Image (spheres, rainbow, N blue to C red):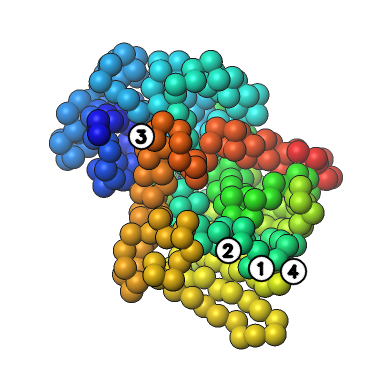
Amino acid sequence: MKKLKTAIIGLGYIGESHIEAVNRIGGCTLYGVFDANKELAKEKTELYGIPKCYDSIDELLADPEIDVVHNCTPNRLHHEINCRVIKAGKNLFSEKPLCTTYKEAEELISVLKENPKVAAGVNFNYRLNPLVMEMRERIKNGEIGDVRIITGSYLQDWLLYDTDYSWRLDPALSGPSCCTADIGSHWMDSIQFVTGHRITEVMADTDTVIPVRKKPKKANLTFTSEVPDEYEEVEITNEDYCSVMFRTDKGARGVFYASELCAGHGCALSYEINGSKASFGWNQEENNKLWIGRRDEDNSLISRNPNAMTGAARRYTSLAKGHPEGWNDAFKGNMSAFYSYIASEGKTEPVFATLEQAAYIVKLTEAILKSGKEKKWVKV
Ligand SMILES: NC(=O)c1ccc[n+]([C@@H]2O[C@H](COP(=O)([O-])OP(=O)(O)OC[C@H]3O[C@@H](n4cnc5c(N)ncnc54)[C@H](O)[C@@H]3O)[C@@H](O)[C@H]2O)c1
């Protein structure tokens, strides 16, 4: 089988995880990189022995060797770069969110339609946690009955103090949303994927809890807790908190909240799904465990065990029981699903997020911001 050649644009926090994942999955070789920060690009090229370090996105896209391009740049650049990648005839694996407005998302979908040979996916990586796949299969098989209530949260703490700063707070780089687009998007994608429901109405409360922050004069690293020596005080408009009540197309109701102001949490994406027969509960920070709640029998807390997993989910776990799989493994699994889809020429199920699915998350984000502003229910 021909090995696909991959290029990565953007080598910051998540770009490094892409490098590691590409190096771990079969079927592709990391061939080239580009980052606006030339020093960083050079450093990663040497560290990982990457054959090519391009001088520009144009040069990267013009290279006929490249089959797949990963876009790991800040959100506001996604639309333009994703468009250029597809138009260059390269397969696209974009970081989430797909882009920052639904209008841009529609444009991307039509550009993809004009380039039918291109495969495109968006990195909603929590889907490929083995026990998330397991819940999805069991819900499909009717184990918890009709899904009625979906609740949960996505909590982090890296914006807790006013000395914490990120481009995610700057509309020019992030678009109009911070926590909803950044982490709420993962929560919504994950529960829609697992339940097969679509959120169709939202009633949100959004807030910028810290309205003035100390922005470092020198660019800082994502998720750093360093206090800057030199800073300027800047007004923040993007939200750092959202809570959302919602209804789904299949009649379920739910509520979730997301914020990066929750001390003690690094990546606490969690949810509980209550069905007409039983419930499931899962938390990313303890991702090898799945809680099953029942009324007339004992509850159980099962551990990931490939031998006991549902057939379709079994495919997405690799280590034997007792060998915990982590965040990086699920990340690799998502990427692997995308590359298998390309290798099968679109014949395998796209379990990674498609452009249409990721566009819907952008639409939901817009609806949440609108609802938060207007303080009323918004139909999506
Ligand atoms: N899937 C996940 O779990 C996950 C986690 C973190 C971040 N992300 C997403 O990844 C993207 C990047 O986030 P991050 O945390 O890595 O940010 P980051 O700031 O750490 O890295 C961004 C990189 O992009 C580079 N860059 C900026 N402008 C560029 C340009 N015009 N051309 C090329 N490179 C450019 C920067 O120099 C930097 O190295 C965001 O869209 C974010 O939402 C996803």
Q: Under tag 2, what secondary structure?
A: helix
Sequence-earlier tag: 2 or 3: 2
Amino acid type shown at disc 4: Ser
Above or below residue 259? Residue 287 is below
Sequence-earlier tag: 4 or 2: 2
Q: Is mark 4 within 8 Å of ligand 1?
A: no
Asked where in the image residue 28 lies, by quadrant, the reply is: top left
Sequence-earlier tag: 1 or 3: 1
Mark 2–mark 1 CB contact (< 8 Å): yes
The residue closer to the viewer here, 65 or 236, is 65
Asked where in the image residue 42 lies, by quadrant, the reply is: top left
Q: Which residue is mark 4?
A: 276
Marks 1/4: CA distance?
6 Å
**Residue 144: numbered disc:** 1
Residue at image coords 68%, 40%: 364
Amino acid type shown at disc 3: Ala
Mark 3–mark 4 CB contact (< 8 Å): no
Q: Position of residue 213 (x, y in %)?
A: 54, 45
**Residue 138: numbered disc:** 2
Marks 2/3: CA distance?
28 Å
Marks 1/3: CA distance?
35 Å
